[in-house]
Image (cartoon, helix red, strand yellow):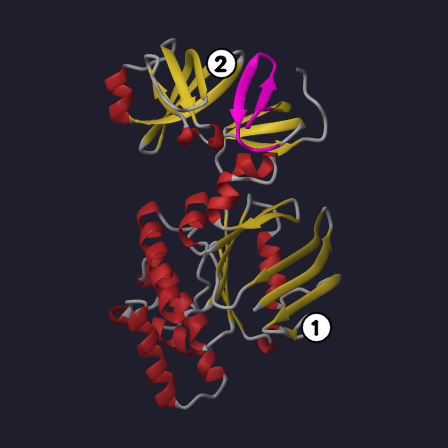
Amino acid sequence: MLELRSVTKRWPGFSLRDVSLHVRDGEFFVLLGPSGAGKSLLLELVAGFHTVDSGEVLLGGRNVTHLPPEARGVGFVYQDSMLFPHRTARENIAYGLRLRRQRPDRVRETVQRLAAMLRIEGILDRDPEQLSGGEKQRVSIARALAVEPQLLLMDEPLGALDPLRQAGLRRELKRLHRRTGLTVLHVTHDQAEARELGQRVGVMQAGRLLQVGQPAEVFERPADAFVAEFTGCRNIYEGLARPDGDVTVFRSGALRLVATARVVGPARAAVRPEHIIISTEPVTTSARNQLAGRVASVEQQGGVYAVTAEFEGHPMTSLITAHSLEHLGIRPGSRVYFSFKANSLHLMNAGEPADD
């Protein structure tokens, strides 16, 4: 459906460099990355709001690189909805259809159909100032869908909403995608959003597309240390990896870890906090990695607690529920045992050797 071929765009102080991407027909694809990574600029290049310096943009096999926005067949949803303030929700949704001189009966039918699909029938005659943030975004999505785009571009559409409304609109977007089968390119910096919505995810940083894959692949098997850290893996170490029978032994100073990945030489090792089991007594387990240390800090993170302990001079963080934290009596200074399986330790090649 959407194909980017070595797309490059240079701005003062920033460049989008040699980005190639293929979004499949009917796919919900999420671009994930920090602010300033180039995600929104990439959407605007696809939409035709800016011209590329080099490379090609193809939609449905058609080269649209030099076509204006109105000739590309895309819809665009912004973070702040961008509704016309002096038009009702109904008039906002109908705007693109009226520009195309659609028959009044077709305009009415389309508006009612989309309002029912997005569950906003009761607000069609309200002005934007009378709508909640979530309602505004539903109207904005309906307006984008009204012109039947080949591709829907969404630029941080949930970013201005509170967590409760974000969760509700995420569910609506999933339901809408299942119902319409529309091709969607969605930008966010939110990991939970990417995991929940994306059939595939691409991670961007500093104008480059670093990794593309299914959410489980990107989050569990990051391509490099930046992807690992940005997707929530706080436990990243530099060292050397060597084969040892059917496993690989990774060492960083006195820290010794075991992995199933076959990496040799300078490497980075990463293990996600949620894969680590924490206990206050040694346990009998099949996990190949079992470490003993003392708690350095306990931090609340939403509905869980991040427990960081020191092992051979290396900090490592595990996540634990409030109930388990209280039950185990864990606090700074507590003796704890961390354990995790060898296949939970992800190894990445590194350019330079670390101290062994």
Give whichever of 189, 337 is nearer the camera. Answer: 337
Residue drawn at the location 27% of the way across and 26% of the way down: 322
Which residue position is annotated with label 1?
66
Residue 60's x, y, as percent? 58, 73
Asked whether residue 291 is drawn in magenta, I would say no
Relative to 206, say whether 92 is above or below.
Answer: below
**SS state under label 2:** strand
Question: Circle 1: is it few (<14), some (14-19), or many (20+) Cα within 10 Å?
Answer: some
Q: Quadrant of residue 110?
A: bottom left
Residue drawn at the location 32% of the way across and 13% of the way down: 280
In-image side of 114 versus 36 (left or right): left
| Amino acid type for the residue under numbered disc 1 | His
Residue drawn at the location 60% of the way across and 40% of the way down: 223
Q: Which of labels 1 and 2 is toward the front? A: 2
What's the magenta bit mostly, secondary-structure-wise? strand
Which residue position is annotated with label 2?
311
**SS state under label 1:** loop
Residue 89's x, y, as percent? 35, 71
Asked whether residue 255 is drawn in magenta, I would say yes
Q: Quadrant of residue 139?
A: bottom left
Q: Residue furthest front?
A: 245
Quick one: label 1 or label 2, which is nearer the N terminus? Answer: 1
Is there a contact, CB below 8 Å, between mark 1 and mark 2?
no
Number of marks present in the image shown: 2
Residue 220's x, y, as percent? 49, 39
| Amino acid type for the residue under numbered disc 2 | Phe
Residue 179's x, y, as percent? 35, 69
Q: Which residues are magenta?
A: 244-262
Give whichever of 239, 153 is nearer the camera. Answer: 239
